[in-house]
Each structure stands twice: as C-alpha cells, then as structure tokens.
Image (tube, rainbow, N blue to C red):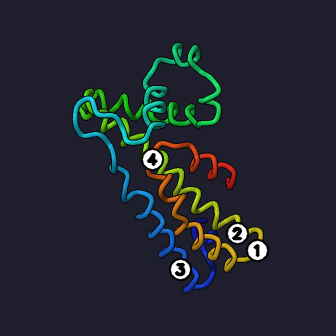
Amino acid sequence: MIRSLLPSTVLGRIIFIALISIGIFLRVAGLTWGIPDRENQSSVYHDEGHVLGSVLMSWGDFKKEFGEYEIVRPVFFWRLLGRPLISIGTSMGINDESTRVFELSVLRSITSFVAILGLIGVYYLGRKLGKESTGLWALSFFVFMPGHWYYSQILKGDVMVATFFVL
C-alpha cells in the first residue's frame, strides 16, 4: 500500500525520501528553542502561554473561559492530544511544575507532527492535481518554506490550520 503512494521511479523515490527527511529535520530541530528552563520564566512567545493555560485548565473552566481568541486557534486539538500525554508525563514524574518544559515540548511536538503530515499532504495534493513531478515540485517548495518550518516549532495555530486546509 505505501509503495503505491510513493513515486513510481527510483529517482522520484530518492527525491521524495530526501525531501521528507530534510522536512522532518527542519520541523523538529528547534522544538526546544526558547522554552524556559528556569523557574518563573515564561515562553518567549506570547501565544504559548495562552495555549498552555487553555490546555491545562479543567474542561469546566475552559467552557466558561472559551472566547473569540480560542476560536481562531486549534486549542481543542491540542487539548485532545496533549492532555493525555501531559497526564502520562505527570504520573511518571517527568515534568517540572515550575518550568513547564515538558508540557511545552509535548504540545510543540504535536504541532511539528501535524506539520510533517502537511508535507506529505502537499505532495499527494500536487500529485493528484498534476502528476508525480508536480507533487515533488510542490513538496520541494513547501519543505524549504521558512514560515512553515518556523511555525511548526512553536505553539501557534498557523501550521495546524494550513495542514488541515491541505488535507
């Protein structure tokens, strides 16, 4: 099944695997940049504090506090995937309540994973709209798009929204 989704030529497969590998590296290389490593230090990104607060609050408080700001951010997605992972880390004693390094790393990893799915989605969209070479060209442009790989490393909804538009 996976073989039928790859390009049909050997050169096409090599290019596809190389581009996907570079794309994965660019999207996970900076996941820990700017995460606070000392007590009482917030993230350098203003939105990450809002997202983390929205993910960590109880569902009842979240329903009361839900407003227009959360409509434009995929907070529900982070809550559904991130809360169980954060709970597992908390029960294992991995997280540090004073720095929130673990929590931010988990949520950033979810964003990065979705961005990687977006790379594959762009290839298949280009392949369906054109041919295999069109998909590879679309993938090559998307892999090196600075905004996409930068925003895939932080807690902003831009990459999530872009990925779901492609899918």
Q: Nearer the viewer, mark 4 or mark 3?
A: 4
Residue picked out by circle 1? 130
| Residue 7 lies in quadrant | bottom right
Q: Amino acid at mark 1?
A: Gly
Q: Amino acid at mark 2?
A: Gly
| Rendered residue at 45%/20% (across/down) | 57
Residue lying furthest right: 129
Using the image as rendered, state which of residue 4 and residue 55 is in the foreground.
55
Using the image as rendered, state which of residue 47 and residue 136 is in the foreground.
47
Query: Sequence-wise, which precedes: disc 3 or disc 1?
Result: 3
Count of marks, rendered view: 4
Query: Sequence-wise, which precedes: disc 4 or disc 2?
Result: 2
Spatial CA span between label 2 and label 1? 6 Å
Spatial CA span between label 2 and label 3? 15 Å
Marks 2 & 1, CB-CB < 8 Å contact:
yes
Query: Sequence-wise, which precedes: disc 2 or disc 3?
Result: 3
Marks 2 & 3, CB-CB < 8 Å contact:
no
Using the image as rendered, state which of residue 119 and residue 70 is in the foreground.
70
Residue picked out by circle 3? 15
Q: Is residue 74 left or right of residue 127?
A: left
Query: Sequence-wise, which precedes: disc 4 or disc 1?
Result: 1
- Binning the other alpha carbons within 10 Å of mark 3 as few (below 14), some (14 to 19) or many (20 upward) gives some
Can you tell which mark lies on residue 154?
4
Q: Nearer the viewer, mark 4 or mark 2?
A: 4
- Binning the other alpha carbons within 10 Å of mark 4 as few (below 14), some (14 to 19) or many (20 upward) gives many
Q: Look at the numbered disc 2 and give the secondary structure of its residue.
A: helix
Using the image as rendered, state which of residue 163 and residue 45 is in the foreground.
45
Q: Is residue 138 left or right of residue 83?
A: right
Spatial CA span between label 4 and label 2? 27 Å
| Rendered residue at 22%/36% (across/down) | 38
Q: Is residue 78 left or right of residue 56?
A: right
Can you tell which mark lies on residue 126?
2
